[in-house]
Image: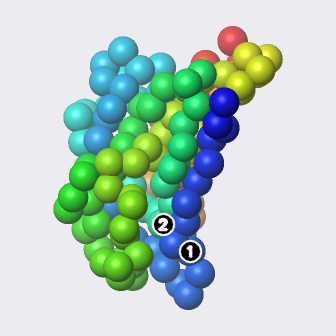
Amino acid sequence: MAGLTAESRGGSGRSGIVDWNNSGGAGSVVTGAYRGADTAIMDPPTWFSSVPGTMTVDGSLPLTGFFLSGLWNRTEQTGAGGSAVIAHGTNTAATARITAFAMNPLYRADPEREWPMLAASAYWVDK
C-alpha cells in the first residue's frame, strides 16, 4: 500500500496564494466548518501526489486556475491541479491518527482562517 507522498516546487523563493476546495464537505472533521472554496498561502508550493486508502482527502486544489498570485511559474504547476492538500486518517498500520497539510497553516501567522482547521485536526488526532 502506498503511503502519503508529496511533491513540491520549492526553492528559488517560490511561494504563492492558491485557491483550494473543501473536498471533505460539511462532514469533514478538519474542514467541515469551511466554505466550499478558500485560499491558502503555500511556501513552498506543495501537494500530495499519493494519499493512502486509510486517509480521507479534506482539501484539494482545483483542476485549473488555482494559482492566484506569487512566484510560481506555470510550468512548475504541472501535476498539481486536482491534487490533495489536506488529508486526515490513520497511518497504513492503523496505529496512529494523522492530519497532513501540504501548506503550513501557521506560516508567519498570516493564514488566520487556517488556525481553526489546525485546532480541529489536533482535537481529532488526540481523541
Q: Could you tell whether 42 is left or right of 108 in the image?
A: left
Q: Is residue 39 visible?
A: no
Q: Is residue 15 visible?
A: yes
Q: Could you tell whether 92 is left or right of 16 in the image?
A: right
117 lies above or below 60: above
Residue 58: give its label: none
| Image quadrant occupied by the N terminus | top right
Q: Identify residue type, mark 2.
A: Pro
Q: Residue furthest bottom?
A: 12
Q: Nearer the viewer, residue 20 or 4?
A: 4
Q: CA distance from mark 1 to mark 2?
A: 6 Å
> Percent x, y for residue 39?
32, 53
Asked whether the beta carbons under mark 1 and mark 2 sit within 8 Å of each other, the answer is: yes
> Percent x, y for residue 47?
49, 54
Q: Nearer the viewer, residue 45 or 92?
A: 92
Q: Secondary structure at mark 1?
A: loop
126 lies above or below 38: above
Which quadrant of the figure has residue 120? top right
93 lies above or below 21: above
Q: Which residue is mark 1?
A: 10
How many numbered marks have been drawn onto this rendered protein structure? 2
Q: Identify residue type, mark 1.
A: Gly
Identify the residue at horizontal 55%, vertical 24% (top origin).
53
> Percent x, y for residue 64?
21, 58
Q: Which residue is mark 2?
A: 45
Identify the residue at horizontal 39%, vertical 38% (top origin).
59
Q: Residues within 10 Å of mark 2 (few under 14, many from 20)?
A: many
Q: Nearer the viewer, residue 82 or 99?
A: 82
Which quadrant of the figure has residue 84? top left
Identify the residue at horizontal 36%, vertical 26% (top origin).
24
Q: Nearer the viewer, residue 113 or 56?
A: 56
Q: Residue furthest top?
A: 127
